[in-house]
Image: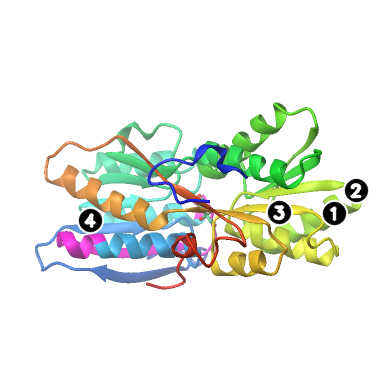
Amino acid sequence: MKRTSRGLAAAAAVALAVGSLAACGSSDGGGGGSDSKKIAFIQGVSGDEFYITMQCGIEAEAKKLGAKVTTQGPEKFDPTQQKPIVDSVVASRPDAILVAPTDVSAMQAPLKAASDAGIKVVLVDTTVNDPSFAVSQISSDNEGGGAAAFEAIKELAPDGGKVLVVSTDPGVSTVDARAKGFKDAAAKDSSFQFLGVQYSHNEPTQAAKIVTAALQKDPDIVGIFATNVFSAEGSATGIRQAGKQGKVNVVGFDAGPAQVKQLRDGTVQALIAQQPDVIGSDGVQQAIAALDGKSTKKTIQTGSTIITKDNVDGDAKDAVYQSSC
Ligand code: T6T
């Protein structure tokens, strides 16, 4: 399976945080002198290889273009932790903010306020209900990715059966779109029974519990779609705990090192890797264009790769996310 340049291959066959709550990681990166443009990157959550890889793309591009980058992220993918980080970044007056909003509603006002304060806002990965204030939005084809995940499960379980989605939280634009893409594709095939979406709150232990409980209730589940790094990691743990390794097909979004290990050991059958580095570098380009008074692209869709055991050491090798730059 191949890495698409832009867009999914058709169903592809198969802080400075305030208060005690929101401790956050912070780092400096990128180049530029004292009068270089200042870009603040606010991750959805720190320690997630998806956002670490995005940070690497941002820092590399910023270095090329002579901009200075700072990166911060909340400890949890949670708007109550991300909002104080955004407020504090806005108070520090960067030229541009690249941000992955953790909730479509709760992050609307804080990010609009950033834009109203004259800061160029670029939405990377996730979005908000009304993103009209943003100079650009860059993300994967999340709905198409969900549909591709269903096609992958269908290829692995051609006779159909029960399928379940394990997601993070409702209100997160990306994973909601992935779950919708999967559900809509499953609805078109009467040999499959869609068991619904269950929410792990981005906690692998919770995802594992969801999967073990679901398998106790419906031991004949044929496929599980886990919508991101942590749901996939936990779903695979749940499969192992239930002794269903290789018997239930698991397709996960994202490709962190732990997920790739689970693919190699046969707990997970396919991964849909995004291009977080490209989302990041495109984000820097759009921010700089806006600051230079040039036109920007309102939306940019980046590509993805389906990784299986067959291509993980070949064509798909470079699609695996980084743990550090
Ligand atoms: O899947 C990515 C990202 O696209 C999503 O918005 C949140 O979860 C991840 O960061 C992976 O953990």
Residue 76 can be seen in this image:
yes
Residue at horizontal 73%, vertical 47%? 156
Q: Earlier in the sequence, mark 3 or mark 2?
A: 2
Comparing 202 with 227, the one in front is 227
Q: Nearer the viewer, residue 186 or 45?
A: 186
Which residue in the structure is indicated by mark 2?
217
| Secondary structure under the numbered disc 3 in the rendered image | strand
Q: Give the label, 1 or 4, closer to the camera.
A: 1
Residue located at (42% from left, 70% from top): 25
State the mark number for residue 213.
1
Graded by Cα atoms within 10 Å as few (under 14), some (14 to 19) or many (20 or more), the crowding at tag 2 reads: few
Q: Which mark is residue 250?
A: 3
| Mark 1 element type | helix
If the image is split into quadrants, where does the C terminus sit?
bottom left
Q: CA distance from mark 3 to mark 2?
A: 18 Å
Marker disc for residue 94: 4
Q: Assign a secondary structure to mark 4.
A: loop
| Residue 184 position (above or below residue 261) | above
Give the extent of the magenta segment. 61-80
Does the CB distance between marks 2 and 1 fall below 8 Å?
A: yes
Q: Is residue 38 left or right of residue 170?
A: left
